[in-house]
Structures are given as structure tokens and as C-alpha cells.
Amino acid sequence: MAEEKTFYITTPIYYPSNKLHVGNSYTTVAADAIARFKRLTGYRVWFLTGTDEHGQKIQLQAEAAGKEPRAFVDEIVAWIKELWDELDIDYDDFIRTTETRHKEKVAKIFTRFYEQGDIYKDKYEGWYCTPCEAYWTERQLVDCKCPDCEREVELIAEEAYFFRMSKYAQRLIDHIEANPDFIQPPSRKNEMINNFLKPGLEDLCVSRTSFDWGIPVPFDQDHVIYVWLDALSNYITALGYGEKGSIYETFWPADVQLIGKDILRFHTIYWPIFLMALDQPLPKTVFGHGWLMLQEGKMSKSKENAIDPRVLADRYSSDALRYFLLREIPFGQDGIFSLENFITRINTDLANDLGNLVSRTLTMAERYFDGVLPEPSAADGNTDQELCSLALETPATVEAYTDQLKISDALSELWKLVKRSNKYIDENSPWDLAKDPDNEDRLGTIIYNLIESIRFIAVMLQPFMPRTPERIWVQLGISDDHELQQWSSLARWGAVKPGTVVSRGDDLFPRLNMQAEIREMQGDKPADKDTEGVAEEDMQEGLISLDQFQQVDLRVAEIVAVEKIPKADKLLKVEVVLGDSDKRQVVAGIAEHYQPDELVGKHVLFVSNLKPVKLRGVLSQGMLLAATAEGNRLALTTVDRDMPSGSRIS
Ligand code: MSP
């Protein structure tokens, strides 16, 4: 019997200190896509996620909320589980570090370390960063702050247990050098070796006494086990480590442990050393992905600007959010999350490319063949061959990229097939062929090929966007044919049966109005559905909708400096400020009407979102509004009360 292929993948376990933001969801969505991909390609998969519930940070936050720590985390854990349901995270197990199955094993692990001499008791004096739950030496601090999160650290002096890290340091360096896949992407490996291992590993403090929300040290109840030792162990306790016949034997060592780059040190130094001390194999790959940032900086669960993934999934669908997260940022690098980027992806990749392909094809199948899939005839010309070859090659490329954890590249390969299929429509102009009944065979072949290509795309899409394929299969009339949804069905072109009844459904991803979305998501006035579309007769009469008017960003600008522009009699260069930090210059055609000096200090109406242009070689970044009348009369428009510069005009 062929040996079963197994695959174990983990995410970090999240602190249930607050609701998660879209950055945290990023890791879990990626892990889920990989897990689904491995299941689809025939692996027995175990996908673990969970929550890291002990420690000083949680205890303090619970106190601040006036709750017992357990009640405090229960609520957030319930929210996190709902989030994962909403994002279609199909985990096999969810571990909470407050569960008995975990606590008992961690206590045993700690005792074993102590008994075998890896842990000893001493006194800790040094710095502690509670948000990171990390110890730092004076030398490691940057400007007296935590080098990781740049927040305040606290000086602590406690009796504590220490783990002899140094004993294992050389073994770990050797392992990292001999196993290039162990730390991924490769750039992160040098950082660990040069910054932490080579300078010499200090023994790690692994217990605390100044609070009690943790797993007690079994033989010294004044101490609780350091939250990172507790948390890291989850990856094995959840599998039943230490229990005979548990799935630990099937799945450990992990194939991929996904984490954010900020917690690499814990996962590539402490974690492997704990495993070495337990005499267990190390994970095959620890992958430290980059950070999702906002344009204005870091995301944080406690910051107001954090973006709530549930709101995004509710509004735009979890598939769209998953697609964006997986496609937008090369996995491993940092990237920007902005609503503009997100909407652009939806409109281009999902609505224009994928959505249009499906709707155009199904419309033609209905129009030309009454929705009954025609029999294809022999391939005719290069375009058929190219489409079919690309479809047959794509699964292997997508698989190779996913295996290398290059998920964005995998999706971009898949989109090559989407785009090639759209191009195939344009190249063959079915609407022209349809004019002549003699072309029926050729037209039938084209429709057949498109349906088959869409089927290929839908099969490959499953791990990344779990809901969309089903919607496509319904349209293709194959939602009950599970064979045609399998990865193995992609080995052969032409598996979908002629005669299948297809039917066009709703658009998969309707195009969104960027301005309206931004306005609504930023909590401004909701888009007025009645005035969103401009009726044709209104356009003819020169009327615009409120929506169109609101696209103009009008502000109060204060004029702070004015200069003549050499050799331009009518123009002045005017410097204005809009609030404290926005300074602009504009070229205004008002030199015949105003002297530079009389303008300074005026508060005028200003169009602030005009594309910048150069006039007579001078940059102009907006427009001053003025009234004009016959007889070359002109007056700048101002506000009739004192208003701060930057005020919005609506
Ligand atoms: N509890 C620890 C992990 C213990 S694992 C044994 C922890 N929790 S966390 O909730 O603070 O962070 C969890 C994960 O979210 C980390 O991998 C972190 O890198 C990731 N992210 C936090 N903010 C992020 C972004 N803005 N972008 C991407 N990932 C981010 O650390």
C-alpha cells in the first residue's frame, strides 16, 4: 500500500487581548489556503491554530476591563472563532492554552527540563516588555524602549527559573546551516544567526512570580511558567505529545510553521532549543512572513485604525478578502493594506478578469446554444492549442509555487489562464462567427473550450477562494459532479461532458464604485443609493449626482505667500496651507486682478484633489475658486466667517 502523505501546518496562537485585525487574519488565511491546497492534492493534513491565553499582558487587560482573565478571554476567543468561520478557515484543531490537555503537558515538560538539569533557579534582574512578553537586557534596548515594538519596558527583579540556552546554541547553529529550509525566507536566517546566536545566547528566564495568570511551576507554586514556553509548546501538546497512539506520531515534525517576522526569534531559537531538550525533531520549515501595514504605519489591535476583518468580509465577501490578502503581497514581504488597493483588486482581477470571463462565456453559451454545452470539434488553429496547453500546465506551476509558499505567484499563474481565456474570446470573436450558421461547429468548440478552461480555473481556485468555485460550478451545471472538481481531473483536457446544461447566474463580483466605498467605509455619509447612478437624461441636461459632486474635495485654504511668475503677465504663484501639515502651491490666473501683497492671509475656497500639472514650468497642485463676470471682472471666493484652513466644504 502506498504510504500516506501527511502535512502538518500551524499558525501562531493569537493573544486574545483584543479583537484581531486584518494583519492577524493574514497568517491564518495563508495557512488555510496552504492546508486546503495540500488536502486537494491528496495529503492527509492537520491544520492547527488557537489562542495564547496566559501571561501578564492578558491579566492586565482583563483587570482593566474589570473581568476575570478567563471570562475576559472567553469572549474574545468566541469572537476569533466566529472570525475564522466567516473567513472559511478550515482548521482541524483549535488549541487554547487554558485547556487542561495543554496545561498538563506543559507542566510535565517544565518538570522534565528541571529534572534533566536544563532549568535552574536564580534571580532575574532586567527589563521586560509586557506587550511582547519578552525579556531584554539593557544592551538590547533601543532608546530605553523595546527593540521589537518600541514601547516602554519595565525593570523587574524576581526570583526565577532559567533555561540553559547556551548549552544548545552550537547544535542549533549547525542545524540551521545544514537545513536551508528550516528558516524561510532565507534572508531571515542570517538575521537570527548574526544578531542572536553568534553574539552568544543568554540563558532564558522561564518563570515569573509577580502575577499568577499562567501555568504554575508544578514543584514551586509561587511561579508561573513563562508565557512563551507555555505558548510554543502548543504545537506539540495539541497533537497529544507524550500520549501513546496520538496523532503526534503521525504529524510531528511540522511541515510548515507560519509566523509573522516579529516572532521569529521565539520560533527559530527558543522553540527549536526546547525541542532539542525534549529530544524531538525540529519543524521542517518556520516561515516568517512580512507585515501588513497601513499607509499611516503599523496596524495594532489596540489602535483605532485597525481594520476589522469581519466588517471587510461582510461587505466584500470573505473570498474577495482572502484573494486580496494572498495576491497583493508577495508572501514574506511587507505590504500595504488600503481600501483603495483592495477595491482595485476586486474591480480588476475579480470583476473584470474572472467575473467577466464567466459571465461572457455563459451569456454566449445561452445565446448561441440555449445553454446546452456543444460537442467540440478538432482543435482549430493556434489559439485552441495555446489555451489547452496553458490549462494543462498551470496546475503543476500553481502547485510548485504553493509548495514554495509563494502564494501570490501561484495566484498570478492562475490569473494567466484567466487572462488567456479572455484573450481567447477576443481573438475568436464568437459574436462575428455567430452571424453565419456555417460557423456553428467552430463556435461550439470555442464555447466548449471556454467552459473547460473555466472549470480548470475553478478547481485550482478552491484553496484560495473556497466559495467562488461552487458558484461557478452551479453555472457550469457540474455542481453535483465531484469528479470534475478534483485536482486529478486536471490531468486531462475535455472532461466536461457535451450536453451539460449551463446557465448564467449573478455576476460573481460586481464592480464597485471606489469613491462610494471609501466614503462609506470611512464612516462618512452613506452612499445614497437613489442618486448613485446618474440617469441618462440628467447627464444630457448637464446635471450631476451628489456622488459626482462629492468627488471634488473642496477646502478652505489660507494664502501664505504669493510671487509673480516671470514672463507670465496673468499668472501668480500662490502658496497656500490646508491645515497644519498640507502645504501646496498653485498657479492662478489672477495677476491682473490682485497685487501679491493683498492676497496673503486671505482664506479662499480651494479644489484640493485636482491632478497636479505644470503651468509655464511651475507645479500647480490645486485650484483657487473665483467668480468671474463680463468685463473681465474676477473675485476670489472666500468664507463669510473665520474658518480654520483645511476646513472641508460640503
Ligand atoms: N501569542 C503570540 C504568538 C505565540 S505563538 C506560539 C503572538 N500573538 S499576536 O496575537 O500578537 O500575534 C500573532 C501573529 O500576528 C504574529 O505572527 C504576528 O506577526 C502577526 N501579526 C500581527 N500584526 C500583523 C500585521 N500587521 N501583519 C501581519 N501579521 C501580523 O505574537
Image: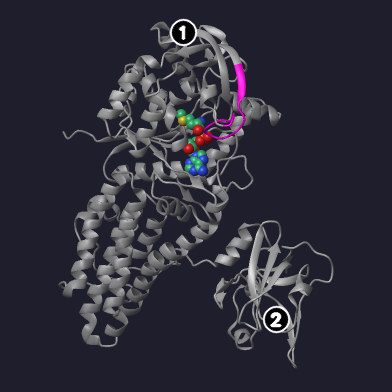
Image quadrant occupied by the N terminus: top left
Q: Is mark 2 within 8 Å of ligand 1?
A: no
In percent of width and height, residue 615 lies at: 57, 77
Whether pointer 1 and pointer 2 mark residues with C-beta atoms closer than 8 Å, the reply is no
In percent of width and height, residue 328 lies at: 43, 54
The three-letter amino acid code for the residue at tag 1 is: Tyr
In magenta, the rendered stretch is 143-156
- Judged by its main secondary structure, the magenta piece is loop
Q: Is residue 508 above or below residue 542?
A: above
Res. 120 mark: 1
Residue at position x 37%, y 74% in the image: 363
Query: Distance from label 1 to label 2 (Cα)?
Result: 82 Å
Q: What is the quadrant of residue 584 in the picture?
A: bottom right
Dot 1 crowding, Cα within 10 Å, few <14, some 14–19, many 20+: some
Residue 267 visible in rendering: yes
Dot 2 crowding, Cα within 10 Å, few <14, some 14–19, many 20+: some
In percent of width and height, residue 348 lies at: 43, 65
Image quadrant occupied by the C terminus: bottom right
Residue at position x 59%, y 35% in the image: 76
Res. 590 mark: none
Residue at position x 24%, y 64% in the image: 497
Residue at position x 60%, y 33% in the image: 151
Is 122 positioned to the left or the right of 636 in the image?
left
Residue 376 visible in rendering: no
Q: Which residue has dot 2 on it? A: 591
